[in-house]
Image: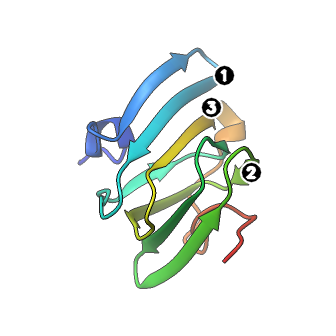
Amino acid sequence: MVSEDPLVTNPDRYSLLFENEFVRVLDYLDAPGDETSPHEHPNSVMITLTAFHRLLQSGDAEREVALPAGIATWLPAQRHAGRNVGETPTHTIFVELKGVAAGAPDAAAIGPQATIT
């Protein structure tokens, strides 16, 4: 089975900042035009360090997401791939939940719940 952990699928974009039995904290950084391979996130809180514009894909579904810097938003458990379609780098922190709180990927979930696009 192929791992869909973003640290494995996209090690050049994600790095581990902290981990314990309750949460895992990831740092994500890319440049305009960069893409990620398909990967999964459990239920998470995403903190935007930069404003960004991304195209997220899950199966046949696509969704554009544009968020300002300096917000925290809920990211339901999901599997997706993404591309930076903006003119600025994407820099975010993910606080991924573990255990029962992690949830299971929802095929209908793509990106954060709160979007500007």
Name the disc covering residue 34, or none. none
- Chain-order first, disc 1 or disc 2: 1
Q: On the image, numbered disc 3 is attached to which residue?
A: 98
Image quarter for residue 59?
A: bottom left
Residue that lies at the very extreme toward the front in this rendered image: 87
Label 3 residue SS: loop
Looking at the picture, does residue 54 appear above or below residue 45? below
Cβ–Cβ under 8 Å for marks 3 and 1: yes
Q: On the image, numbered disc 1 is attached to which residue?
A: 22
Relative placement, left or right, of 95 versus 78 is right
Q: At x 30% / y 58%, what residue is drawn? A: 34
Q: How many residues crowd mark 2 within 10 Å: few (<14), some (14–19), many (20+)?
A: some
Name the amino acid, label 1: Phe
Relative placement, left or right, of 105 versus 114 is left
Name the amino acid, label 2: Thr
What is the quadrant of the C terminus in the image?
bottom right
- Chain-order first, disc 3 or disc 1: 1
Q: Nearer the viewer, mark 1 or mark 2?
A: 2
Relative placement, left or right, of 74 versus 41 is right
Q: How is the image coloured?
A: rainbow
Q: At x 29% / y 44%, what residue is drawn? A: 10
Q: Nearer the viewer, residue 86 or 77?
A: 86
Rounded to the nearest whole Å, what is the CA distance between mark 2 and mark 3? Answer: 17 Å
Q: On the image, numbered disc 2 is attached to which residue?
A: 73
In the rendered image, residue 99, in percent from the top left (x then y), is placed at 64, 31
Name the amino acid, label 3: Lys
Label 2 residue SS: strand
Rounded to the nearest whole Å, what is the CA distance between mark 3 and mark 1? Answer: 5 Å
